[in-house]
Amino acid sequence: MKIAIAQLNPCVGDIEGNSRLALSAVEAAEKNKASLLIFPEMFLTGYPPEDLLFRRSFLMKSAAALKKFSRAIKDKKVAVVMGLPWQGEGGLYNSAVFIRDGKVLDVYFKSLLPNYGVFDEKRYFIEGDKKCVWWLGDMRFAPTICEDLWDPDSGIVASLRGESLDFVINLSASPFHMGKMRQRLNVLKKASRRLGAPVIYVNLIGGQDELVFDGGSMVVSSSGLISFVPQFKEGLFYTSIPLPKKNIVPHFLRKEEEAFHALVMGVRDYTRKNGFSKVIVGLSGGIDSALTAAIAVEALGKERVVGVSMPSKFNSQETQDDVRRLSENLGIDCHWIPIEDIFAKFLAALHPLFKETDFDKTEENIQARIRGTILMAISNKFGWLVLTTGNKSEMSVGYATLYGDMAGGFGVLKDVPKTLVWRLARFYNRLKKRQVIPNSIIRRPPSAELRFEQRDEDALGSYSVLDRIIDMYVEKHRPIDEIISAGIDADYVRRVVRMIDRAEYKRRQAPPGVKITPLAFGRDWRMPITKALD
Amino acid sequence: MKIAIAQLNPCVGDIEGNSRLALSAVEAAEKNKASLLIFPEMFLTGYPPEDLLFRRSFLMKSAAALKKFSRAIKDKKVAVVMGLPWQGEGGLYNSAVFIRDGKVLDVYFKSLLPNYGVFDEKRYFIEGDKKCVWWLGDMRFAPTICEDLWDPDSGIVASLRGESLDFVINLSASPFHMGKMRQRLNVLKKASRRLGAPVIYVNLIGGQDELVFDGGSMVVSSSGLISFVPQFKEGLFYTSIPLPKKNIVPHFLRKEEEAFHALVMGVRDYTRKNGFSKVIVGLSGGIDSALTAAIAVEALGKERVVGVSMPSKFNSQETQDDVRRLSENLGIDCHWIPIEDIFAKFLAALHPLFKETDFDKTEENIQARIRGTILMAISNKFGWLVLTTGNKSEMSVGYATLYGDMAGGFGVLKDVPKTLVWRLARFYNRLKKRQVIPNSIIRRPPSAELRFEQRDEDALGSYSVLDRIIDMYVEKHRPIDEIISAGIDADYVRRVVRMIDRAEYKRRQAPPGVKITPLAFGRDWRMPITKALD
């Protein structure tokens, strides 16, 4: 008996589009003689729909689409499990429906609702408290939804123990972060052990604002992986029951590789789902903008990426040459718009107020804001999306100009620490089998080039140490003492921590970007701006 | 027997400062021979601490501060109920501790955790499941925390029925919105009826990022209000037990009056708690910037408010005269920085790209962004906070320039619909008993003055109709059909709804501002940017 896994990419809110996608999956599964077709969690509405779930019209549209979809497939032999929100008597449920012969035979309600990290499910849903066991031929299987399996000793899943099931299915919308596949496999192995049945895990794929769902659907028994679908690959995949008894050795992508794919998918889907024809990137000759442009080209093709170089007297000949070389290597258009004259006029206009002050970060920021204004002007004029180029290390300590280099619609590297930026650039060149990102860019000490002789690491300390502090303080919420005990200079730790705490107001106004770490500056980081910590 | 109500203003994160504030309240209550002193919910840490609660060091600091505080008051006769987070065996609780003779005698755990609107309590806390009854002399009373009383038929509170209590206390951190006092009184009356005992309701006061806590603590019996503390007034207030049997007639502030006080408190506390000496406001001659400046002067005094006028050729003589008059009336400094020369240089720099295009919103936005850059330069140079001036109607439909007039640290009118802006301006002049905001500003049809002959209402339609749609679509999540049924032109409704949905990317990058309506564009509005709705 063949089972089809719909590792497909819906769009949040596009209920009609998602229905069409679902219908063609049914056609294909039927043609391939599958007996069961499983969609991911909340496929019909896309995930996470967030406060759209408060709109009654949205829920009604979803319910109507389910009816229409069921009727449309009434002549198909394949049974379907679809994920969607379900308005029950007590409230709204995150649900999976079992459809056969054009009828919704049963509905299962998710029983464990994640309300941590990026998740707010208790804001929207109530917990289900009834298990379901469904038949397919002479097979008995039970539906579960995502989190349900992450704690198999509580909720509905605990009550499934003892049922003699042939298999368990799990509709999932599990967002990507580096290393998540390994974590999922362990969770599923444990769940399979507890339930005494293999698990068919069907994960969502695609980018949605700051989240990327990476797919990586798999079939897992208590002893390990039985089969899996590659991450970042959309499509319909098949497995068959009874499952082979033999495990396969999991092949996990390396850190840079999966991060790269996630960034590419995040950019592609944000651009596509929001209807942009092209993106623009300010190219400084630095590694962040180089990698951002490379990712954009990978995601969209070189014709849809436009570079803009906006030099001032502080930009060296070398970096300008590198911009030229990079644009050529990527095959993208690059426009040159010098900012010196505009900068001079700003200084003149502000002279009456500033005449007794020194050149400081104010004048640095003016340059960055001129560039932000130019990029946004091009965006406004032609309808292109501005990609920002700041990385997570900068976002953490606030080493970025609000409305300057932070101006744009999508922050590609927002969650990529600087040390990983370097690794990704090298990975990218290896992938392309040539030096697309010139080595001079990779090797040059980072500088904002907003005054002469400026070096990031003079202001911030070594990025490798900085990133260790960020890992501990931001990602793991470790106390300062513990970070110092790890062998980092105490004064430096305190200085960095203070910068991190104080930069909250900047982060609050940053554009969204692709989450690739376990804790990104997005829905999973809700810090007050006002917090007199020091 | 005297009971003291600490309607005091802590700062989130400032555990030491809040402890000091608490100690002086104990001193004062002791001097006034109070037997019991009640603090608001989470007073020791401030509310809401959000993800600071994930920092172990933060919780340890709070626990240590409680110990120190208890010991420091061991010679006092007054008993104290203090609100703080409490690390219990199963997890973290939102708690109230009963302190007497320097000892923590008991701890109560909040049982109903709000996880809607601006609240994320299930992200942090677990639910308490044990009631407490405490003695004070021969009086029996029970502690409850905020939400506990909002549904008196469930949770712990239901289990308190039948206890014969002399009174119930409620530690609260209930954020302000217009009309909330009336709602609270009804809730407390109902709770008092259910519990058969009067409620002493102690609410937090002060601004915290986008929230303002307005105080308005009160004593309520089943038949109505017995006594109350004014909103927006910090201090220690007293009531006595047994309570007078007679109700008083509640005096609710009028809508404009309470909104005005909330805005003033929001600006004052954001400025103070984040350590800014001054604020700057871009003055356009329009009503939004005029009201913003007036509120800032009310909050901080005229010496701490600086106006900046940044005229272009599109700004009329009349609006410029109004800026002068307004600055004089408010008694604030106003700097004049014309933007024409900078604008010309931007156009020149972009000419190679734009030469075959018409003047459109691109050029309009450049002007707004030049102004944003100038304000931010002044902010960077002198360390002053930029107040943005956009109102809720503009924020709703995206009639604002990202990084332009949206550039700044705090959006005073962000949650004030335009129709209420007018009412507030008139209210303010009545309050000051003179035309501080010139009538010409109030009466002039609104214009962004980014090109000649521009009128907001040509682009947006009448603000009075627009605000009705916003009220229904944003605040109440009403479906489009229903809005049309209310008698508004169908095409216009669809156009506005489309603008609202599409402006999400702008709102995501807006600064925080004071919430004054039941649903603001802040923590209580979590809409995806990517949402193919049309």
Image (cartoon, coloured by chain):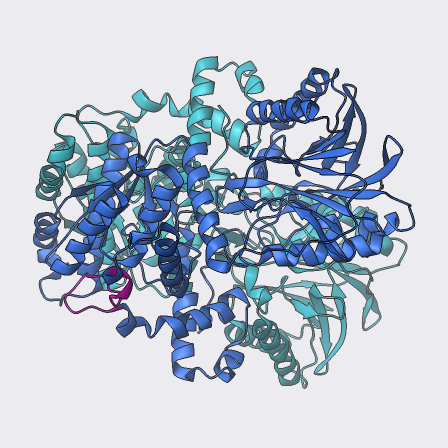
Chain colours: A blue, B cyan
| Percent position of residue B99, x then y | 71, 76
For residue A131, above or below residue B47:
above
Total numbered labels: 0
On-image quarter of the N terminus of chain A: top right
For residue A192, above or below residue B250:
below
| Percent position of residue B269, x then y | 43, 59
The answer to whether residue A183 shows anywhere in this view is yes
| Percent position of residue B476, x then y | 57, 31
Magenta stretch, residue numbers: A441-455
What residue is drawn where x is 81% and y is 59%?
B129
The answer to whether residue B285 shows anywhere in this view is no
Q: Depth check: give the residue in front, B84 or A162.
A: A162
In which quadrant of the rendered view does residue A479 lie?
A: bottom right
Q: Depth check: give the residue in front, B224 or B465.
A: B465
| Percent position of residue B77, x then y | 70, 80
Asked if residue A382 lies in the magenta stretch, the reply is no
Asked if residue A452 lies in the magenta stretch, the reply is yes
Say left or right for A243 vs A323: right
Q: Main secondary structure of the magenta part?
A: loop
On-image quarter of the C terminus of chain A: bottom left
What residue is drawn where x is 56% and y is 45%?
A213
In which quadrant of the rendered view does residue A222 lie?
A: bottom right
For residue A404, above or below residue A381:
below
